[in-house]
Amino acid sequence: MKQLSFLYKAISWFCILLLTVSSLSAQQMPEKGNEIGTLYNCNIVDTDSGEILYGQTVVVEDGVIIKISPSKKRIKKGEIDLSGKYIMPGLIDSHTHWGSFGQDSTMAAELSAEYLKCGVTTVRDVGGNVLNIKDHLKHVAEGAYMGPDVYYSSFWATGDYHIMDYDYRGWDGDKNACPWSRMFSVKDSTDQAIERAVLEAKAIGCTGFKLYINYSEEDLARIIPIIKKHGMKVWGHASQVHGAKAIDVAGSGIEVVSHAYMLADIFESRDSLTFEELEYVKQVCKALKKNDIVLDITAHISLEGDMPYSVDIIKEAYAAGVRFVVGTDYFGCAVPDEIKRLKECGISNIDILRAATLTGAEIIGQVGKLGVIAEGAEADIIVLPGNPVKNLDVLNNIEATILDGKIR
């Protein structure tokens, strides 16, 4: 009995010693703004295939993932123990107006905190004041606050649409020639004038163009090749209202179209579609799929805007295999709401995760750099308590957001 008692005590002391050594070796999650270094024994979510790569160690240097390898049996000193945790790429909100909503550093800092809390590390601005965006990016680079990276557009419209004055704050030139927000008539312009305007937008750092409203099928046929010639992305509304219809836009060479509800060429509150309208939507969705055009759905704001017929359109687009991104068009971070709406429309967990990461990175030209946990990618990572492929609700319980290798 004495021998058993001694053995029991020895085992107990050994376990205590092992736990003590482990706790001394493992580093806790660093404080806000600090580099993370190495993440030990985490489960990596592949948001393309839905597969999980279990028990991996991720090494980060200077904001970039430099090595991913199977974790060894023992943790090394300084490594952050994420045993049992899941990691995936930071989320991308593919439809914001950051430059309009973040009008000064205080507002931008508040927006940033809200977005990062939701796990959003990158946004696409499709119409906002570029000077505000540049100020935001400058403050982030200088360490004034942490905030999402912003890929922004030059916002173009024509016809009787008047762009609001706040888009021009800080611009001292002709409002009709503002590089990031133009009232631009394609039919009244030469190809040289179009090209000059495109180059001016590129020079201020725009990633793409938001073709907002009233451009005809002929206008699109002229402008889109010139934009692409200079390596710029082409985005726009799914229907041009008084210009090209949705079926025309789907064949125009545009890369991303916004708002599922516009695929029916309807701009009013409506509960449902007629049989003829639904058949038209099916043809539009076939064209989107054929031409590999990505749909920026904006489900949440559409349903809040009393357009329930958009659910039928979303389901048709999904059934047709149209690729999509997660975009909100909302003041403040509504990505959790958007994800919930998409799920309610019958979209699978992995398709939503892919849309919020990989496809979001693709439409801004950042494949391999964003939207993926891989060597050479930016260390934009969210830490989760469970597997989001099985249960999207874990995205509502984000344990840490890592931006450019630093803890939020």
Image (spheres, helix red, strand yellow):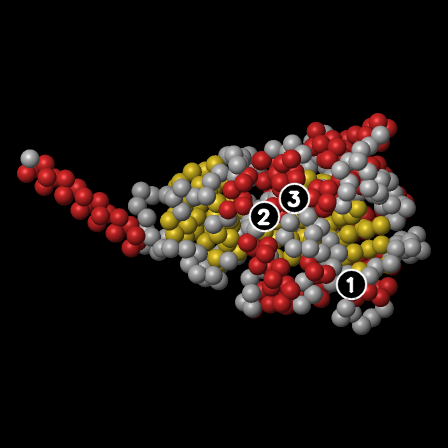
**Label 2 to label 3, Cα distance in Å?**
12 Å
- Can residue 71 be seen here? The reply is yes
Gap in angstroms between the C-alphas marked 1 and 2: 27 Å
Say which of marks 2 and 3 sits in front: 3
Residue 308, position in %: x, y?
Answer: 76, 38
Give 215 or 115, whichever is nearer the viewer. 115
Can you identify the residue that label 2 sits on? 91
User: Is 354 placed left or right of 95 in the picture?
Assistant: left
Q: Amino acid at mark 1?
A: Asp
Residue 167 disc label: 1
Between 134 and 273, the residue placed more toward the observer is 273
Residue 385 horizontal/vertical position (percent)? 46, 43
Residue visible at 17% across and 46% down in the picture: 13
Other-residue count near label 1 (Cα within 10 Å), few / some / many at <14 / 14–19 / ≥20: many
Residue to which mark 3 is pinned: 338
Q: Earlier in the sequence, mark 1 or mark 2?
A: 2
Under circle 3, the secondary element is helix
Q: Is residue 217 left or right of residue 315?
A: right
Left or right of 69, for residue 20: left
The reply to whether dot 2 and dot 3 touch (C-beta < 8 Å) is no
The residue at the point 75 percent across, 40 percent down is 260
In the structure shown, which secondary structural element does the residue marked by tag 2 occupy?
A: strand
Circle 3: is it few (<14), some (14-19), or many (20+) Cα within 10 Å?
A: many
**Under tag 1, what secondary structure?**
helix
Q: Residue at x 68, y 47 (%)?
A: 327
Which of the two labelled residues, at mark 1 and mark 3, occupies the earlier sequence position?
Answer: 1
Tag in front: 1 or 3? 3
Provide residue 301's location: percent of width, then percent of height.
Answer: 72, 46
Mark 1–mark 3 distance (CA, rounded to whole Å): 26 Å
